[in-house]
Amino acid sequence: MLSFIIVAAIAIAVIIGYKTNFNTGFFAIIFAYLIGGFALGLSPKEIIGGWPVSTMFVIFSVSLFYNFALVNGTLEKTARYLLYAFRRFPGLLPFALYFASAGIAALGAGFFTVMAFMAPITLLICDEAKMNKLTGAVAINCGALSGANFMTSGSGIIFRGLMDEGGYSDTSFRYSAIIFIASVVFSLLLISFFRFVPKSSRSTVQNTSVTRPKPYTTLQKKNLYLMLIMILVVLIFPVLHIVAPDVEIITFINSKMDVGLVAIVFSAIALFMKLAPQKDVLAKVPWNTIIMICGVGMLINVAIIAGTIDLLATWAGSSLPLWLVPIAFSIVGAIMSFFSSTLGVVCPALFPLVPALAATTGIHPLVLFSCIVIGAQSSAISPFSSGGSLIMGSCSTEEERTHMFPKLLFQAVPISIIFSTVFNIVLSFIL
């Protein structure tokens, strides 16, 4: 009965957040307090202890560092250079939009930031090039999602943190790298479908007058180099450890590497280099996302203490055919993400199920993690979810918004979910 109440509480928190447009994390914390304190008998200290401090620290510190590039225009200029590089290949414009979005997301801008400034640019480019706007919307949505899945970017870091909490700290880097590669392949296949299959998209896209961006300023060059160095520092030792696991010095340094702590070091360097005002950088920290992820994390911690997670994992392992378990996770992730955030709700709710379910069924945990991520991100373009709502908000007129809504809801979402389901079936046989 208690497990049912907890599952219902998670659903109610998501529904209230969606209906009121308030942060779901607030309601998750309230339910964690009420259920944990009065039903489970936990002390206030134990309930507050469920706040995922390490996850919060990583999101804060990494976003803080990359906000320097956001404030001084380095990220936006990088996107414009990538678009300019494709100016002579108009037929490949959707892929240019994808790589521009993925590139700046991988550099650390994060999904929401990329969508916020790429969506208006994309819709204007689609008008100019006579390209299907739905194709352009899918391209930047996929780019922002898969780019953010990079191991040192926002989503990839959160995935690694959740895996670490589930007991996969030794393999979380490799798992997140494979999820990133899988999301890129899935994205390119989906964009190819939207670009070449529908009749409305097969017509030749016209040349655009994308002008050459102004050169990077000295400040922006410094910021770009600093970002590349930071990415190199964070990536090189985990990679070397995979290649040479028996070398003691590499193993030692790798054990001390933490992307959040490294990001703080580089943030201090950026401050001394005066790359952007401290006030502006701090103002762009995604507190809304932090509260959502950590609030839901508190409720999930109560569910773990109550045994709900193990109960759900046991039920899924015993009630569903083995081959159907990864697909079920993919579809459930897509349904949840239709109304809510992949990072804030779906992954914190489903990732904790993986260790017990993998142990019960023998399914490789990487398969389950990948299916959750790909499935959840397939419906992020829903007008009720983060990606679709940002696209809708970027429409210049009410007529354009009215025209885009059904295309996102009845074309982009179903096709993306079908694609993700088929892709995850194939993926479950490969991994």
Image (cartoon, helix red, strand yellow):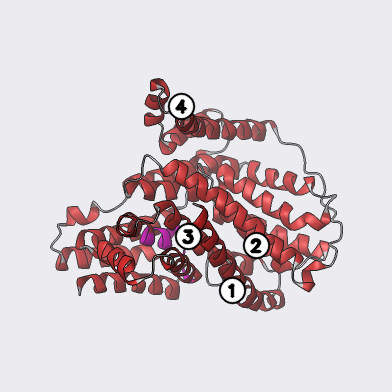
* Direction left: furthest residue: 41
- On the image, numbered disc 3 is attached to which residue? 371
Q: Could you say whether the residue bearing mark 2 is in a helix, strand or loop?
A: helix
Q: Could you say whether the residue bearing mark 3 is in a helix, strand or loop?
A: helix
Q: Position of residue 412 (x, y in %)?
A: 63, 71
Mark drawn on residue 414: 1
Seen from the viewer's position, the closer of residues 382 and 112 is 382
User: For the magenta stretch, what is the residue range?
Assistant: 339-350
In three-dimensional space, the C-alpha distance between marks 2 and 4, rounded to whole angstroms, equals 36 Å
- On the image, numbered disc 2 is attached to which residue? 190
Three-letter code for the amino acid on which mark 4 is drawn: Ala
Whichever of labels 1 and 4 marks the residue nearer the N terminus, that label is 4
Q: Residues within 10 Å of mark 1 (few under 14, many from 20)?
A: some
Three-letter code for the amino acid on which mark 2 is drawn: Leu
Whichever of labels 3 and 4 marks the residue nearer the N terminus, that label is 4
In three-dimensional space, the C-alpha distance between marks 3 and 4, rounded to whole angstroms, equals 30 Å
**Camera sees residue 113:** no
Is residue 277 shown left or right of residue 209?
A: left
